[in-house]
Amino acid sequence: MEKASSYLWRKYADYVWTKWERMLIWNMVEPYMRPKSFTPVVTIYVAAFYTGVVGAAITEQLYKEKYWEDHPGEIVPLMKPTFYPGPWKVAMGQVPAHLRENSG
């Protein structure tokens, strides 16, 4: 009987240890696991993209209407990008001569 009980205790100890070990490992790995489905992520990205497209179109239309109020009948110059602080190579709605393909 002694052998059987020590065998059972050893098996139980192994079970508890591996259970604890699995829990520890999965708690470390779980934050890095991929989501079960990418559908919600893709849906959010598509919605965000089209929200940005619609927002940009509305912003540009408002810019044009404001320009036409101040300068009726004139051609509206290109709108400078709002969130792009880099070099802007278009001056007064025209590409500079030194940047054109057919210059020369």
Image (spheres, rainbow, N blue to C red):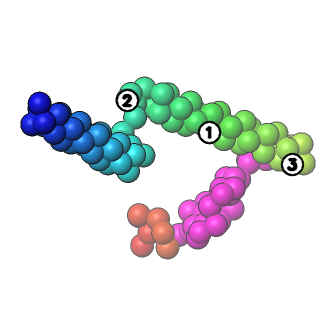
Please indicate whether residue 73 sits to the left or right of residue 102 in the image.
right
The residue to which callout 3 is attached is 71
Q: Residues within 10 Å of mark 3 (few under 14, many from 20)?
A: few
Q: Amino acid at mark 3?
A: His
Residue 60 on image: x %, y %:
71, 42
Q: Residues within 10 Å of mark 2 (few under 14, many from 20)?
A: few
Query: In terms of secondary structure, where does tag 1 sit?
Result: helix
Foreground of the two, 55 or 95: 55
Q: What is the C-alpha distance between the residues marked 1 and 2?
A: 27 Å
Residue 16 on image: x %, y %:
29, 40
Report the residue at 56% width, 62% height from top: 95
The quadrant holding residue 22 is: top left
Query: In terms of secondary structure, where does tag 2 sit?
Result: loop
Residue stretch in magenta: 73-97
The residue to which callout 1 is attached is 52
Q: Which mark is residue 77?
A: none
The residue to which callout 2 is attached is 36
The quadrant holding residue 66 is: top right
The numbered mark, 1 or 2, whose residue comes first in the sequence reads 2
The numbered mark, 3 or 2, whose residue comes first in the sequence reads 2
User: Looking at the image, can residue 88 be seen?
Assistant: yes
Instruction: Report if residue 76 lies within the magenta region.
Output: yes
Report the residue at 11% width, 30% height from top: 1
Main SS of residues in magenta = loop
Foreground of the two, 55 or 104: 55
Query: In terms of secondary structure, where does tag 3 sit?
Result: loop
Q: What is the C-alpha distance between the residues marked 3 and 1?
A: 28 Å
- The correct choice, above or below, for 45 with respect to 20 in the image is above
Report the residue at 58% width, 70% height from top: 87
